[in-house]
Each structure stands twice: as C-alpha cells, then as structure tokens.
Amino acid sequence: MVPDGHRHDPAVDAPTRTALIERYKAGYDEVVAALEGIDDAALDARPGPDEWTAREVVHHLADSEMTSALRLRKLLAEDSPRIEPYDEAGFARRLPYDRPIEPSLEALRGARSSTASILERLPQSAWTRGGHHPEHDRYTVEDWLEIYAAHAFDHADQIRRARSGASVRP
C-alpha cells in the first residue's frame, strides 16, 4: 500500500471493469427473471433445512444491496473507511422475512440503479480507493464491484434452485 492508503495500479483493466458494471446493472433483471411466475407457495418452499426460501433470498438481496450501496459511497467519499460486515443470518432471523417481496425488489432496483449511475461516472483514480473490511482486509472500489457484479446472479441461481427443489417435493 502506498502512503495515501490507495493502490495506484488497478487490478482490473477498463474493458473488464465495463463488463462488470454491465453485469452489476443486469443483476436486478436476473433476479426478476428467476422469480417469473412464482406463487406464494413456491416463494415459501424451503429446499432444505438450512437453506433460504426464495422469499428470504429476495429480502436478503434488498438488505445486502442497501448495505453495499452505503459501502461503496463510504469507499468513495471517506479516506480509508472501515467497512463493517453485517450478520446476514441475523438479519434473516430478526427481520420479518415473511413479508411481501415487492418493496424489497424495489429497494434492490433502486439501490442498483442509483449506484450504477455512480459507477459509470467514476474517474480512473477512484477505482483503487479503499478501506479496511475485517473479512477482506484491504477492500477497494474494484473489490466491491467484483463482489457485487456477481451477487444478484448468484442469488438468482439460488432462487432457481429453491424453486426446482420445491417442485420435486411431495
């Protein structure tokens, strides 16, 4: 790390970064596609004893997206911020995850849309800004993008698995 607390050699080249931003922007649509035609029974089917239902996944995505949006803003606006982890399982246990999914989908859409407009306008120098995350140590804007470009897609796949697991249950 250099004295100002920022890497000056981006790990991701510009075309890869552009692709990651496009993937990030497409995440909401991927989740909506995974939910297409789902009914309440399928939303609430638990594919395994320790697995989340599709409804719980949607609420997690909203919680995570709002948290991640704030994390990115801290990385960009503060010098060497501490990026706090959050207990996603605790959120799922303590927040009412049995509620309707539409407001959570809207939170996911809004956070992604607002954040994407920031990502598309960042200067080259912003991508190496970073802070400290106890689970990742050094945590940069590029690290953030790599994680969250995949996040909604990973959970859309989880929703699909939950739906297919639910369809074969008696």
Image (cartoon, helix red, strand yellow):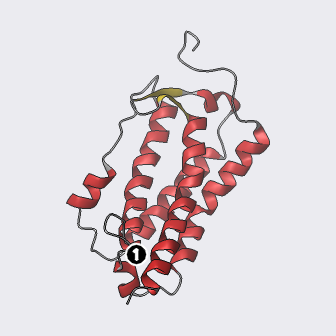
Q: Residue at x 48, y 71 (%)?
A: 159
Image spot of residue 49 (x, y percent):
31, 68
Q: Which residue reaches farthest right? A: 15
**Viewed as shown, does residue 134 lie left or right of 75?**
left
**Viewed as shown, does residue 123 lie left or right of 93?**
right
Q: Residue flagged by tag 1: what amino acid is it?
A: Glu
User: Is residue 13 depicted above or below 93 in this figure?
Assistant: above
User: Is residue 11 depicted above or below 44 in this figure?
Assistant: above
Q: Residue at x 36, y 67 (%)?
A: 52
Image spot of residue 87 (x, y percent):
30, 47
Q: Nearer the viewer, residue 11 or 111?
A: 11
Q: Residue at x 56, y 27 (%)?
A: 129
Quarter of the figure with residue 99: bottom left
Badge 1 element: helix
Identify the image quadrant of the N terminus. Answer: top right
Identify the image quadrant of the C terminus. Answer: bottom left
User: Is residue 143 depicted above or below 26 in this figure?
Assistant: above
Q: Which residue is mark 1?
A: 102
Image spot of residue 22 (x, y percent):
69, 55
